[in-house]
Amino acid sequence: MSDMHTSSDRDLVEDVLVLIVEDEPALRALAGDVAEAAGLHFVSAYDAKQAMTLLESRSDIAAVFTDLQLRGSMDGLALAELVRQRWPQIDLLVTSGTVTPQCHQLPPGSRYFSMPYDVEKVVEALQSIAGRARRHRPNGA
């Protein structure tokens, strides 16, 4: 059974989807709460491999919010770089409580939030992403 979680439809007005990648269940749940506070739907993955499966099977992911320190063969920085290369239209938000990357280490256009992150700032970033995603949809779909 997969540990993948998806948001419910309760009180979510946006149809913009965020992929949360976090190996710690409590932090994954917190990130989901933050996405929902921003009014967004989300799916989550516990490692980069599961995230790649979701990215390859879905075309509706507007943003990836990943921890830099992930278990498995690929860390969050490598995942973010791969997302930037393969899906340049997807916004990237990265976070870590143990590593503070230099700006040149992050993929272009990504945003970094140190843990514990300011929930309001992450909500604002996600709402900004949602606004851009809605404006760029063909025929207001």
Image (cartoon, grey):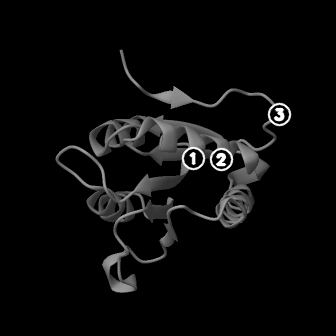
Q: Are marks 1 and 3 in contact (CB under 8 Å)?
A: no
Q: Nearer the viewer, residue 101 or 129?
A: 101
Residue that lies at the very extreme toward the left in this rendered image: 73
Q: Are marks 1 and 2 in contact (CB under 8 Å)?
A: yes
Under mark 3, the amino acid is: Asp
Q: Is residue 85 left or right of residue 91?
A: left
As drawn, the label of residue 121 is none
Distance (Cα) linking label 1 and label 2? 6 Å
- State the residue position of label 3: 11
Q: Secondary structure at mark 1?
A: helix
Residue at point 45%, 63% (across, down): 94
Under mark 2, the amino acid is: Ala
- Above or below, 28 against 126 in this view is above
Residue 98 in the image, given as x and y percentages of width and height: 35, 65
- State the residue position of label 2: 35
User: Within 10 Å of the Cα at label 3, are there few (<14), some (14-19), or many (20+) other Cα atoms?
Assistant: few
Of label 1 and label 3, which has the lower sequence position? 3
Q: Secondary structure at mark 2?
A: helix
Under mark 1, the amino acid is: Ala
- State the residue position of label 1: 31
Q: Nearer the viewer, residue 34 or 117?
A: 117
Residue at point 74%, 51% (across, down): 38
User: Within 10 Å of the Cα at label 2, are there few (<14), some (14-19), or many (20+) other Cα atoms?
Assistant: many
Residue at point 40%, 34% (across, down): 57
User: Within 10 Å of the Cα at label 1, are there few (<14), some (14-19), or many (20+) other Cα atoms?
Assistant: many
